[in-house]
Structures are given as structure tokens and as C-alpha cells.
Image (tube, grey):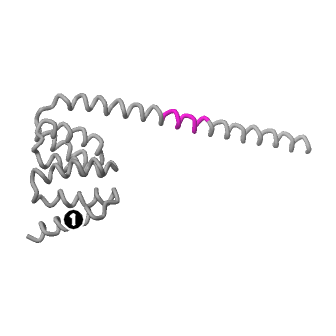
Amino acid sequence: MRAERILTLIIAIIAIGAILFLGFRFVMDLISTDNISSVSTKNLQKAYAEEISNQTDVNKLTTNGIALVQGNQPDCGIINLQRAVAIDPNYRDAWVWLGYAQIKQNQPNEAIVSLNKAAKIDPIHPDTYKYLVIAYTDTGDTASAKQAQEKYDNLVKK
């Protein structure tokens, strides 16, 4: 009877040890896969940026950039939109969407620069000011956010 209890205890200890070991291996595999995944993502973004650098169709770049931003891939959308504004610095929509993508990527200062360029190109485009409100708010510049909100309100009332 006592030998059976000892044997059961030994089996339980071995089972618990195996579970702990397998759990540890699983966690280590997840950590190493995560590192590989982030490296792979960076490599893919670099390769994508190189591919986009050869594109010259501003409309296609902007359309693809917008689709990527709307598809929750603002980082790739930014690559397209930056290329579009590099080719045509007077393309308002590319600047507006670049600013919006930068907001989604938590880059409000960069978004302000992009959106102000859009405002210089077309000072009566409401979306520019709608996104400027968000960007200025994200930076804590409430006075500028208020001014942008007033411009937006005046434009949409017309």
C-alpha cells in the first residue's frame, strides 16, 4: 500500500516536471518566434519601400496608400504616400492621407507638417483641418487645435 503511494507520488512529480518543461519550451519558442517575426517585418517593409521607390504613378501610389491606411496598414500606406508627395509635392490628397496615416502611427508632429502642407496647397479642404484638430490635440497644442476646429466648422457650414 505504501509502495503504491510512493509510486503514485513519483509519477505525479514526473508529470508535473514534464508539464513545466514543455510550458517553458513553449514560452521560449514564442519569444524567439516573436524576435524573428519583428526582424522579418522590418525586412519586408524595407523591401516594400525599395519596390515603391521605383514607382512613378502618383495616382496609383496615393490610391494604394489610402487602401493600406484604411486596411489598418498605415506603415505601408505611409511608404506609398511619401513616395507620391516626393514625386508631386503639390498633390493635396496625398499630403492629407499621409497626415492621417501619421496620426494612426502615433506621429502627430509629422502629421502636422504634412497637413499644413496640404492646407497651403488647398486652404479650403475640410478634411485637412479635421485631421489637424486630432494631431494638435495629440501634441497638447489646444490653441492650434481650437483654430483648426474653427476653420473646419466654417468650411463644413458652407
- Does residue 62 appear left or right of residue 20 in this picture? left
Look at the picture and state if 57 lies above or below 145: above
Where does the image place residue 98, in percent across and percent down from the top left?
22, 47
- The residue carrying pointer 1 sits among few (fewer than 14), some (14 to 19) or many (20 or more) residues within 10 Å by Cα, namely some
Q: Which residue ends up furthest to the right in the rendered image?
A: 2
Figure check: 117 above or below 138: above
* Residue 152 % position (x, y): 17, 65
**Outermost residue toward the bottom?**
157
Which residue reaches farthest front?
143
State which quarter of the image contains the C terminus. bottom left
Q: Residue at x 28, y 56 (%)?
A: 135
Q: Nearer the viewer, residue 2 or 58?
A: 58
Residue 32 is inside the magenta segment: yes
The quadrant where residue 51 appears: top left
Q: Is residue 135 covered in magenta?
A: no
Which residues are drawn in magenta?
Answer: 25-33
Is 147 drawn above or below residue 39 in the view shown? below
The amino acid sitting under disc 1 is Gln
Residue depicted at 23% across the width and 57% down the height: 131
> What secondary structure is the magenta-colored segment mainly?
helix
Please indicate whether residue 69 sits to the left or right of residue 12 in the image: left
Look at 25% across and 52% down and name the residue there: 112
User: Where is residue 42, by image quadrant?
Assistant: top left
What residue appears at the point 25 percent right and 47 percent down from the top-left corner? 69
* Image quadrant in which the N terminus is located: top right
The percent position of residue 87, horizontal first and vertical second, equals 12, 36
Find disc 1 in the rendering and name its residue.
147
